[in-house]
Image (cartoon, rainbow, N blue to C red):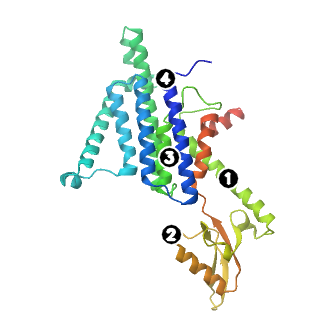
């Protein structure tokens, strides 16, 4: 087995920093249900710097380096916002700096496509000829091919970050911390490390594979919930025991839960308890939760069905080493099944 190259060591260091970052974020998400913006800025700076170092070690030219800076500028919008013309006119130096940062990134992206686009297309068999074959120096041809592949890697990173942006705006990622975490993961694992995982990988960006691993962890929850309910003697109704638990009302305050039992008034004026399958979409504070509990107590109830607010980052944390070790779960499963 060959020793890791300097760029691979840089990638491994970035992954180690990512796990430390996500471990702290998962703890805060579990106990406080929030992760401060400063947390992502500090760790993101280290990860972004190491990404830039790896790009340089991969013999990127000035255009690819500028393009990478542009991607980092795009990612910075999740923590510092996007520059506005009004703020620039009012003398905001930060907005002016970020605007210039964006502009340089766009120029770098355009230059990269112009200089390396044809070579990149050849490397994925979408072109029969490439400018690098008109070079006479073998070393120059190897560098041109390497830069074409690096351009494809950066395009894959852009696709991954764009997917996160769409998922956040479509409310598939509910919290701002969840989206910021996925952006940091995308920068830390922008492409599959050259050492390679034990499993299979595809052109799918690693950040999407991490999301899939996280979703697989969520699929275990219904079985755990059913077992817990059966152990507590709650064997029905079937539509509730796979996703909710029945707690004593006095046990609920202080926990991050949604109450699914609620008082409803029937058409003949009778008040009765009904269980919802899903919690209401509105945000519930401590006062609302206490009022809800009092309503149930006034109706003579001593317990209620609740569903826990599962912190997403707690499931993302183990998904990172799973992706690094076993690769893309879908590709690995298809390979095992011989497909």
- Image mark for residue 219: 1
Q: Closer to the N terminus: mark 3 or mark 4? A: 4
Element at badge 1? helix
**Marks 3 and 4, how far apart in space?**
25 Å
Element at badge 3? helix
In the image, residue 166 lies at what x, y percent? 45, 50
Left or right: where 313 falls relative to 66:
right
Is 59 in front, or is 209? Answer: 59
Q: Quadrant of the C terminus?
A: top right
Which residue carries the number 4 mark? Answer: 6
Residue 73 visible, this orientation: yes
Q: Closer to the N terminus: mark 3 or mark 2? A: 3
Q: Closer to the N terminus: mark 1 or mark 2? A: 1
**Marks 1 and 4, how far apart in space?**
38 Å
Residue 170 visible, this orientation: no
Work out which residue is located at the far top of the displayed protein and give it: 136
**Residue at 23% from the left image edge and 48% from the top image edge:** 93
Whether 339 is drawn above or below 22: the answer is above
- Image mark for residue 283: 2
In the image, residue 100 lies at what x, y percent? 25, 41
**Residue at 38% from the left image edge and 16% from the top image edge:** 132
In the image, residue 11 lies at what x, y percent? 50, 31
Work out which residue is located at the far bottom of the displayed protein and give it: 268
Residue 19 lies in quadrant: top right
Name the mark nearer the viewer: 3 or 4: 4
Element at badge 2? loop
Q: Residues within 10 Å of mark 4 (few under 14, many from 20)?
A: few
Which residue carries the number 3 mark? Answer: 182
């Amino acid at each position: 087995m060959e020793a890791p190259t300097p760029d691979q060591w840089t990638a491994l260091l970035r992954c180690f920093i990512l796990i430390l970052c996500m471990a702290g974020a998962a703890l805060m998400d579990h106990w406080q249900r929030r992760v401060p913006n400063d947390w992502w800025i500090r760790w993101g700076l280290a990860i972004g710097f190491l990404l830039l170092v790896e790009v340089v070690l991969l013999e990127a030219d000035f255009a690819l380096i500028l393009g990478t800076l542009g991607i980092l500028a795009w990612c910075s919008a999740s923590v510092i916002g996007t520059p506005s013309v009004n703020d620039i006119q009012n003398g905001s130096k930060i907005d002016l700096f970020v605007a210039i940062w964006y502009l340089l990134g766009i120029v770098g992206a355009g230059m990269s496509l112009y200089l390396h686009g044809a070579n990149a297309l050849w490397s994925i068999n979408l072109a029969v000829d490439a400018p690098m074959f008109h070079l006479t120096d073998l070393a120059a041809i190897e560098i041109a091919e390497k830069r074409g592949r690096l351009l494809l890697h950066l395009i894959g990173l852009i696709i991954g970050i764009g997917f996160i942006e769409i998922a956040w705006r479509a409310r598939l990622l509910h919290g701002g911390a969840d989206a910021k975490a996925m952006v940091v993961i995308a920068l830390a694992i922008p492409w599959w490390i050259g050492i390679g995982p034990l499993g299979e990988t595809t052109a799918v960006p690693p950040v999407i594979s991490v999301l899939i691993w996280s979703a697989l962890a969520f699929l275990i929850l219904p079985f755990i919930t059913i077992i817990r309910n059966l152990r507590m003697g709650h064997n029905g109704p079937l539509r509730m025991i796979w996703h909710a638990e029945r707690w004593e009302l006095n046990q609920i305050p202080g926990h991050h839960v949604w109450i699914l039992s609620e008082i409803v008034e029937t058409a003949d004026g009778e008040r009765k308890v009904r269980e919802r399958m899903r919690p209401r979409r509105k945000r519930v504070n401590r006062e609302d939760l206490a009022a809800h509990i009092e309503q149930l107590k006034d109706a003579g109830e001593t317990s209620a069905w609740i569903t826990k607010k599962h912190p997403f980052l707690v499931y993302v944390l183990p998904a990172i080493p799973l992706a690094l070790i076993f690769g893309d779960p879908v590709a690995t499963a298809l390979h095992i099944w011989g497909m």
